[in-house]
Amino acid sequence: MKRILFIMIVLQGVLLSSSIEELLIEGDKTPMIYEGDKTLPIASMQVVFKNAGSIKDGEKAGLARFSANILNEGTKKLGSVGFATALEDSAIHLSAHSGTETFVLEVSALKEKFPEAIKLLKSLLLDPNYSDESFNKIKILMQASIKRNESNFDHVASLNLKKYLYHDTPIGQSSGGTIESIDALKLKDVENFIKKQLVRNQVIIVAGGDMESEEAKLYAKEVLSALKQGETSALVSFSAAKVAKDIEVYKESEQAFVYFGSPYNLSIQDKDVHKAKVAAFILGAGGFGSRLMEEVRVKRGLAYSAYARVNFAKSHSDFSGHLQTKLESKVDAIKLVKEVIAGFVKEGVTADELEQAQKFLLGSEPLRNETLSQRLSRSFQEYYNGFKLGHSKEELKKIEALSLKDLNNFIKKHDEINSLSFSVVTKK
């Protein structure tokens, strides 16, 4: 049955698949991931800048996100209201946002309005709204968001864990900044960030929808013509703290918010990543039926839910999880999490757990690959992380063929996940 299902998945990938095109602008080669889809008369494009997210904030925490917010204020010529009106009149979506490693501009519209959408995107790159009015508005909004997050105890616990695991690195900073770091920003900082990071040499184009590849290339070239060539910078990677530490913060909370994490000695390009994903699914990423959920919620009733997963990125990798519990159950819950994870590393998984994980991961694959957006996103991740397109299908084959012995040997090798640091928000 699994074999038939896998064949269906592969056939779907053959019928609907992305390709990598190459754009040549003034001698510079820019990759473009493209997939046509005429299901709806809609076209879309993402301009992704590598190594340009919050990892480039340096000592100015929040700078990448602030810069994205400036671009969301439209052009200086039209102003934020005028630019928003131009988008709305033609039902165009255009936005900027920053992640940890990337900075993204995305645009979508009905096919007949897409040329206009591209012109607006190009004008945005040529004439950002570097006005004092927009700058001060964003400063107020970002600082207000930071203040609100002080009462979001999940956010506080998660951020404190990240700060410890990646202390003194860009990964350990809040991507939204702090009150102090946002207050210290100058408009010139934003201008310099956009000028330095949003350059042609850092771009990957992701395009798709109701347009031919040649059309997509022309649109992409028009956007790229608004960018300077710039410099290429290498992405730096960081390791999570190896020494476990407990962090506790007291708030007026009715529950204890428990976040935990540890190093995970595996890079995103390692040949055993598929084993890590299966192991994590069984331990805590699979929801009901996972080891943590069964032990913490079902058997002991110490939390409504408990999750754990492995996190892979080019810049870092780690193991992390979280739960909420009653104030009086905090100590027992933390103790149990340590015991479950230690037992998992020592004893591995059962044949039934492996079979159920394989069935779910193989059987749910079509749901993760049914829309154009999902397929383009997957193709981008494959290319960005240094794999050939179609790598995900190869990974599924490995998951299908994974034996109990190989998986348990892998799990035992990664006892570093026992070096658990805990970040807790609770009531004193």
Image: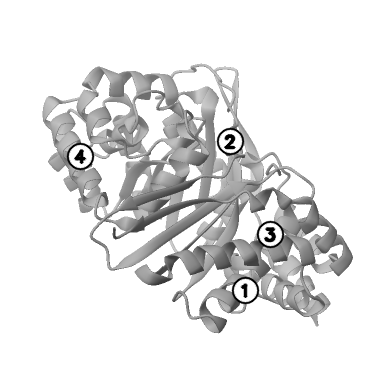
Work out whether residue 250 can be spotted. yes
Q: Which residue is mark 1?
A: 290
Q: Quadrant of residue 279?
A: bottom right
Q: Is residue 172 left or right of residue 24?
A: left
State the residue at coordinates (56%, 61%).
Answer: 308
Q: Nearer the viewer, residue 112 or 101?
A: 101
Q: Please provide percent x and percent y for residue 150.
A: 25, 49
Q: Which residue is mark 3?
A: 277
The amino acid marked with disc number 1 is: Ser
Q: Is residue 85 left or right of residue 108?
A: left
State the residue at coordinates (58%, 32%).
Answer: 238
Give how far apart the Cα atoms at labels 3 and 1 are: 13 Å
Q: Please provide percent x and percent y for residue 197.
A: 43, 24
Between disc 2 and disc 3, whose residue precedes? 3
The amino acid marked with disc number 4 is: Gln
198 up-or-down from 244: above or below = above
Give how far apart the Cα atoms at labels 2 and 4 are: 27 Å
Label 2 residue SS = loop
- Quarter of the rendering occupied by the N terminus: bottom right
Mark drawn on residue 143: 4
266 up-or-down from 41: above or below = above
Mark drawn on residue 151: none
Q: Which residue is mark 2?
A: 315
Give how far apart the Cα atoms at labels 2 and 3 are: 18 Å
Dot 2, crowdedness within 10 Å: few (<14), some or many (≥20)? some
Q: Nearer the viewer, residue 201 or 407?
A: 407
